[in-house]
């Protein structure tokens, strides 16, 4: 410390007492103390204050108040009484002493302010000066049960999963409270078939599902039972366990997803699942699982198989899954709901065509799902536009609109198979009946040698490059195909192809001339239909 004081005094020329004061402000750091001295020399003026104050004579007081007025420029004007009070101080020494005392008082205030700043900078500040009234009170502790409860154990309890799922469904049930529910509009967020083997539990679940409507009268109870889900057919196990059971018992998985706000779904419970022959067929060949679309147990199935869950037009939704591969084999999606005898025949047709026997080959897809064709409204005639508007109006009034799921089983049949009973397959339509196959491949094309308005250039773009060729504008579109079939692009000999112009398939305009088809000075895309 003394070495730091000596360094401070040698640089500043101040006394050792002043040096100790500045070094105390900077925790003994001589460089910071020297810098503080030169930046704030007034901090040293109050060091000798105690001794000087004790020896200083008392300042005479005056009965007059020392007040004045300050003008706009900041000059203070004293009245005559103040002048007399100043003259009453006596000699010049007394006046000087009074000024020195006032300056010392101001220095004391400056010193206290500097000390507080120094403490905040170097020692983190003094917390004793914090106004506690501005500090926010701590948050109160809260306790809430997210999942589980005193009756649920988490050590070796096999029923934990079911208990948790029950709580989740209970919460969904409470959120669904207040919605319009009843016999024909059961709560969609609640699984209404738990504990189906217990009649009392089934009655209670039915009462909850209908919002108590089934308890209001005998007629309501009969209607509720009429539209009750098929508890006796359902397999109430997780999805992965159902697949394992299907592989073990060699049974297909039949899944029904319902939107209970739609009456068509209720018709399944009333007509399809209560038919005795259908029930017998399901018990023999299928593992049946039925879910509400908001049931947490259906999440796995919906995630992988039911992409149109939010479309009303996709309900009722019934599908058959192969438990071995998880493949979706057949689907019924959307209205109209099949009649019981039709549905039974379709089930029998499925069991005839598909087998668990590895020595037999199950049907495979022969074609892709048909995509709806885009309609170019600008090219429609007035009559075609009127007919299109009428069709859209009828479709809207006939029921819900939206996407449906395609039936994979239909993709395994040729167009001639559809609607032929038990799916007896017929041979595919001979290839030579297609428009492309009827185009000659022995009719080469010779470019015209003349120029003029009757000759046009057409650019053909393909995957490996492009070709520019001349044609007469009166040539039919068929000549484009004949030329490419007679003189195929290198490496594409014998491979079928399509010619498209701005999204238009030219196979539909074979008999039009190049001018009529709008192909003058155009670019035609050549797409080869190579098998993968």
Image (cartoon, rainbow, N blue to C red):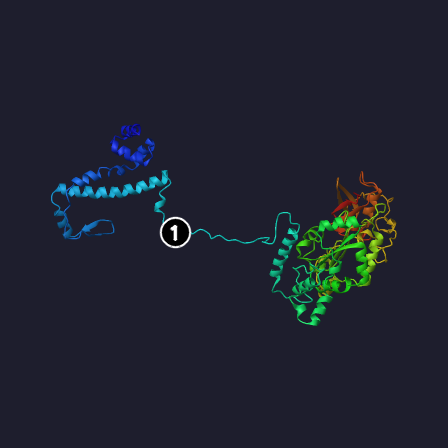
Q: Quadrant of the C terminus?
A: top right
Q: Give x and y (percent) for residue 70.
A: 22, 51
Q: Quadrant of residue 489?
A: top right
Compare residues 396 and 290 and report the one nearer the observer. Answer: 290
Q: Report the residue marked by disc 1.
A: 134
What residue sits 75% from the left and 46% below the top?
Answer: 525
Determine if residue 261 is in view.
Answer: no
Residue 445 falls left or right of residue 96: right
Q: Quadrant of the N terminus?
A: top left
Q: Quadrant of residue 493?
A: top right
Residue 369 falls left or right of residue 204: right
What residue sits 86% from the left and 47% below the top?
Answer: 440
Q: Is residue 250 above or below residue 232?
A: above
What residue sits 33% from the left and 39% below the top?
Answer: 118
Compare residues 89 and 465 and report the one nearer the observer. Answer: 89
Q: Give x and y (percent) for residue 313.
A: 71, 60
Residue 280 falls left or right of residue 229: right
Q: Give x and y (percent) for residue 356.
A: 82, 49
């Amino acid at each position: 410390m003394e070495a730091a004081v000596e360094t401070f005094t040698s640089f500043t020329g101040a006394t050792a007492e002043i040096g100790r004061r500045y070094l105390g402000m900077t925790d003994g750091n001589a460089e910071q103390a020297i810098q503080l001295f030169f930046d704030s020399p007034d901090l040293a003026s109050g060091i000798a204050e105690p001794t000087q104050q004790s020896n200083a004579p008392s300042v005479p007081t005056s009965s007059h108040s020392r007040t004045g007025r300050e003008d706009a420029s900041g000059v203070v004007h004293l009245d005559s009484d103040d002048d007399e009070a100043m003259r009453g101080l006596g000699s010049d020494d007394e006046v000087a002493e009074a000024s020195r005392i006032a300056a010392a008082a101001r220095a004391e205030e400056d010193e206290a302010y500097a000390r507080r700043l120094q403490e905040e900078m170097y020692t983190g500040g003094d917390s004793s000066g914090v106004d506690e009234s501005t500090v926010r009170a701590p948050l109160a502790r809260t306790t809430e049960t997210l999942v589980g409860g005193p009756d649920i154990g988490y050590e070796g309890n096999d029923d934990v999963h079911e208990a948790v799922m029950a709580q989740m469904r209970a919460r969904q049930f409470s959120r669904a409270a207040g919605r319009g529910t009843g016999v024909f509009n059961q709560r969609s967020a609640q699984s209404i078939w738990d504990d189906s083997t217990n009649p009392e539990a089934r009655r209670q679940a039915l009462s909850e599902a209908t919002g108590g409507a089934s308890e209001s009268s005998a007629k309501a109870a009969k209607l509720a039972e009429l539209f009750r889900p098929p508890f006796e057919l359902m397999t109430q196990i997780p999805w992965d366990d159902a697949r394992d059971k299907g592989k073990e018992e060699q049974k297909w998985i039949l899944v029904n997803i319902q939107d209970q706000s739609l009456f068509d779904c209720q018709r399944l419970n009333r007509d399809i699942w209560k038919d005795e022959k259908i029930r017998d067929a399901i018990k023999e060949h299928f593992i049946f699982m039925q879910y509400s679309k908001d049931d947490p147990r259906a999440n796995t199935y919906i995630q992988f198989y039911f992409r149109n869950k939010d479309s009303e037009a996709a309900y009722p939704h019934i599908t058959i899954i192969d438990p071995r591969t998880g493949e979706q084999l057949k689907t019924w999606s959307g209205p109209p709901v099949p009649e019981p005898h039709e549905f039974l025949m379709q089930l029998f047709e499925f069991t005839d065509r598909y087998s668990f026997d590895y020595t037999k080959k199950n049907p495979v897809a022969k074609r892709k799902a048909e995509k709806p064709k885009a309609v170019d409204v600008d090219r429609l005639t007035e009559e075609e536009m009127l007919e299109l508007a009428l069709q859209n109006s009828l479709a809207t009034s006939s029921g819900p609109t939206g996407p449906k799921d395609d039936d994979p089983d239909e993709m395994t049949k040729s167009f001639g198979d559809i609607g032929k009973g038990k799916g007896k397959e017929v041979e595919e339509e001979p290839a030579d009946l297609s428009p492309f196959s009827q185009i000659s491949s022995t009719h080469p094309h010779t470019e015209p040698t003349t120029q003029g308005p009757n000759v046009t250039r057409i650019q053909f773009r393909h995957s490996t490059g492009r070709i520019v060729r001349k044609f007469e504008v009166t040539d039919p579109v068929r000549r484009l195909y004949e030329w490419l079939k007679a003189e195929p692009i290198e490496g594409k000999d014998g491979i079928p192809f399509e010619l498209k112009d701005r999204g238009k398939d030219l196979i539909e305009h074979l008999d039009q001339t190049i001018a009529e088809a709008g192909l003058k000075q155009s670019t035609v895309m050549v797409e080869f239909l190579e098998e993968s």
